[in-house]
Amino acid sequence: MKSPVLEANWLTLLLVPLAACTITVLFAVAALPALLLAPDPTPAAESVGAPGETLALALTGQGSWILNGMPLTSTMVARVLRARPRSVVALRFQPSGALSAAQVAGSLAWLKQHSTLPVRFEAPPVAR
């Protein structure tokens, strides 16, 4: 025969985890509206220092340069970089995904040789 004291202790021991689970569920349900009404996070705008123009420069898989949408040879790109207006404060460089890492590194070194502008590298989109 079981004693009533042992049964009472058993029920008391079950009461603690049950209370803990109840409090956890209540807190989760109470926090749900705040989580649903929170604004979506927005990425911070990237600053390039002083305001000004940025030249967009792309390198195709065949090695052709495209400056602000115009195809140019490397000598023409070098000439444009040397004669750039003072309002241009940075270069945005995006190489083709077909280029090897060595070709991209060589192109970045070539750009740094021909321009004193800071180069902002944009990785090509990854094919899935």
Image (cartoon, grey):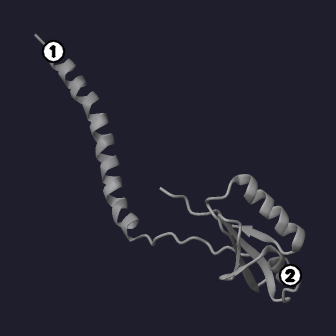
Position of residue 63 in the picture relative to residue 10 (left or right) = right
Q: Is residue 6 above or below residue 65?
A: above
Element assignment for label 2: helix
| Residue 124 picture location, percent across and down | 61, 63
Cα distance between the residues tagged 1 and 2? 98 Å
The quarter of the displayed image where residue 104 is located: bottom right
| Residue 72 picture location, percent across and down | 74, 79
Q: Is residue 31 visible?
A: yes
Label 1 CA crowd tier, 10 Å (few <14, some 14–19, many 20+): few
Q: Is residue 105 above or below residue 58?
A: above
| Residue 119 picture location, percent across and down | 78, 70
The quarter of the displayed image where residue 118 is located: bottom right
Q: Residue at x 80, y 85 (%)?
A: 88
Q: For the residue marked with disc 1, what is the amino acid? A: Ser
Farthest top residue? 1
Q: Which residue carries the number 1 mark?
A: 3
Q: For the residue marked with disc 2, what is the amino acid? A: Arg
Residue 126 or residue 43, whichever sits in front: 126
Label 2 CA crowd tier, 10 Å (few <14, some 14–19, many 20+): few
Q: Is residue 125 above or below residue 47?
A: above
Q: Nearer the viewer, mark 1 or mark 2?
A: 2
Q: Residue at x 86, y 88 (%)?
A: 86
Q: Which residue carries the number 2 mark?
A: 79
The quarter of the displayed image where residue 30 is located: bottom left
Farthest left residue? 1
Quadrant in which the N terminus is drawn: top left
Position of residue 65 in the picture relative to residue 96 (left or right) = right
Q: Residue at x 13, y 13 (%)?
A: 2
Q: Is residue 49 visible?
A: no
Element assignment for label 1: loop
Q: Is residue 114 above or below residue 31?
A: below
